[in-house]
Amino acid sequence: MKIVVIGCTHAGTAAVKTILTENPQAEVVVYERNDNVSFLSCGIALYVGGVVKDPQGLFYSSPSELEQLGADVHMLHDVLAADLKNKTLKVKDLTSGREFEESYDKLVLTTGSWPIIPPLEGLDLANVQLCKNYNQAQEIFAKLDDHQKVVVIGGGYIGIELVEAFANKGKEVTLVDGLDRILNKYLDPEFTDILEADLRAKGVRLQLNEMVSRFEGKDGKVTKVITSNGEYEADMVILCVGFRPNNELVRGQVNMMPNGAIIVDNYMKTSVADVYAAGDSCAVNYNPNQGHAYIPLATNAVRMGSLVGKNIMGDKVAYRGTQATSGLHLFGWNIGSTGVTETSASMFNLDTRAVYVVDNYRPEFMPTTQEIHMKLVYEAKTGRIVGGQVMSKYDCTASANTLSLAIQNKMTIEDLAYVDFFFQPVFDRPWNYLNILAQAALEKEAQTNK
């Protein structure tokens, strides 16, 4: 059986490895338009900030490793067209320019995502950068020491991590975002208010509720960012406004969300027989609303790619869905979130209530302790947990995984309030802080229903 994989970052790499590990007799052919595989773009900010010393460490696989497993790997090859009905592809060798037709028995679409690029005047100016793949990362790395005034556009995870990294390098950093809060997809205002105050205290200039209108430059290089409310000097600009699924190749041939994300079933199959998809090109099966959502995360991609490999020869392991669980370290704060926020719940047609609690993570009689900021979001009628957020100077981020499991298993606030967690004063209180959070939710419900 001939299996063709298009795209080989996280989902593609995981799919190839799993297919060949479990089916060493399979013929697996890989087409990747770049010259590398498995680049962890989340490590770009770590390198900029000096945490990671060697960017080569941001790769966890290579074409040669996939070839050793038995894959026929074609780097710098772009798939120009796909005929899913007739199971044929048109491929271009980007080195020689030669074009040829390829056939397959089964196809794996792991074409990933691409940065959203607003149609702005001045995008062609030097030092206006994207931040996604290794080639873009190399451009940023090469210019680190030569630029002092950095404007980051977009206040999501990648943007915020870059803001911290550049600030720690002593750069003059301005963050511009069209929304009124940073990290709005992951955290509610109780958390972002604290983080924004901290960013300003660290010297970061936050320009929120501002839309970028154009870039201005001199001698072909960017010098200024013009927004709806002002203008900011810049000798480097990094665009981090989000990602879109990279699916033009099969548009109109498989079922998709309105934004072009491919819809897959619990076995990673698309609406077309023998065509599988995984990663940033796909919608995830989202457990909080038991529907679909577009959430491009490396964790989702690796998990989905592995499931393609498990199921390519037949339905074996079902996708458990995702809660979009994530973590972030920002200026000493350890932050974890999972599921919907109180702010985003209505976008997923969920009727929710929420409770916010600040408490110490361990008893006050211990020599030291730290406050934990916690929030639980749950369905108003059922008490089913659909989201959670935690933040502390203490590393509480593993609790986001606990809350993720609670969402996946459809636990209620009552379940979490009385679930068995250990007590040991070095680590926590007689009631674990997640117990305390859920008990606060029960108390809120008791008061609401009086």
Image (cartoon, rainbow, N blue to C red):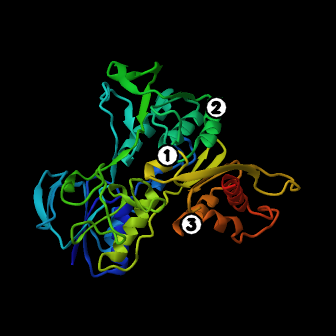
- Which quadrant holds residue 414? bottom right
Mark 1 vs mark 2: which is more N-terminal? 1
Q: Position of residue 347 (x, y in %)?
A: 44, 48
Q: Is 195 displayed left or right of 436 in the figure?
A: left
Up/down of 230 relative to 95, above or below: above
Q: Can residue 257 be seen in this view?
A: yes
Mark 2 vs mark 3: which is more N-terminal? 2
Q: What residue type is labelled 2?
A: Lys
Query: Dot 1 corresponds to which residue?
Result: 185
Residue depicted at 38% across the width and 30% down the height: 127
Query: Dot 2 corresponds to which residue?
Result: 202
Q: Which of 150 and 380 is in front in this view?
A: 380
Disc marking residue 405 = 3
Up/down of 220 relative to 326, above or below: above
Up/down of 97 relative to 152, above or below: below
Q: Distance between the residues labelled 1 and 2?
A: 23 Å
Numbered disc in front, either 1 or 2: 1
Residue depicted at 63% across the width and 62% down the height: 413
Q: Distance between the residues labelled 2 and 3?
A: 35 Å
Disc marking residue 389 = none
Q: Position of residue 28 (x, y in %)?
A: 26, 72
Q: What residue type is labelled 3?
A: Leu
